[in-house]
Image (cartoon, helix red, strand yellow):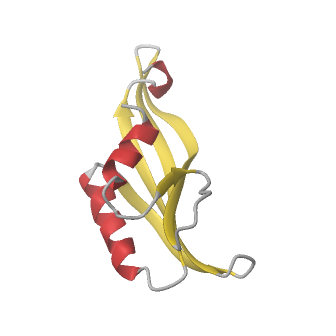
Amino acid sequence: MRIHERITSALHDLNVPVSFQTYQGNAKTYVTFFQYMEQPSLHQDDAIGLSVHYIQIDLWSNGDYLDLDALIQTKMEKAGFRFLTGYDQYEQDVKMYHKSLRYAFEEEGASWHK
């Protein structure tokens, strides 16, 4: 399963839109995500033994998003993603609260061969 499919599968039942990179709808709360780095982590026998995907989940909302934040973190952990960092922001230009959550996901082999 590709990394985007893993993310959308983990977050499919949040009851808010989940979209790759950008969201074009009218929902007041939604989630976007992207992969900010992919890197081989373990080499064996002249081949990549392990690839690590570094991804960011962005939660956007006009109001309180704490319950949704906790739900996202639970779902990502259950799907095998390792939490790295998170931070809260307020985006003045769009007048929205913004929570960024960063995760790592390890998989065997070179992911681009799948």
Q: Position of residue 91 (x, y in %)?
A: 67, 78
Give the image quarter of residue 43: top left
- Figure label count: 0
Q: Position of residue 12 (x, y in %)?
A: 34, 52
Q: Is residue 51 above or below residue 48?
A: below
Q: Position of residue 77 (x, y in %)?
A: 29, 57
Give the image quarter of residue 38: top right
Q: Is residue 65 above or below residue 108?
A: below
Q: Is residue 60 visible?
A: no
44 and 52: which is toward the camera: 52
Residue ID at (30%, 57%): 13
- For the C terminus, the image quarter is top left
Task: Return the residue found at the far right.
Answer: 93
Residue ID at (72%, 82%): 92
Q: Is residue 25 left or right of residue 53?
A: right
Task: Return the residue found at the far top.
Answer: 45
Task: Return the residue found at the far left.
Answer: 78
Task: Return the residue found at the far bottom.
Answer: 64
Q: Is residue 113 left or right of residue 71?
A: right
Residue ID at (40%, 47%): 7
Q: Is residue 104 above or below residue 29?
A: above
Q: Is residue 19 visible?
A: yes
Q: Is residue 74 left or right of residue 58?
A: left
64 and 26: which is toward the camera: 26
Q: Position of residue 54 (x, y in %)?
A: 50, 48
73 and 39: which is toward the camera: 73
- For the N terminus, the image quarter is top left
36 and 91: which is toward the camera: 91
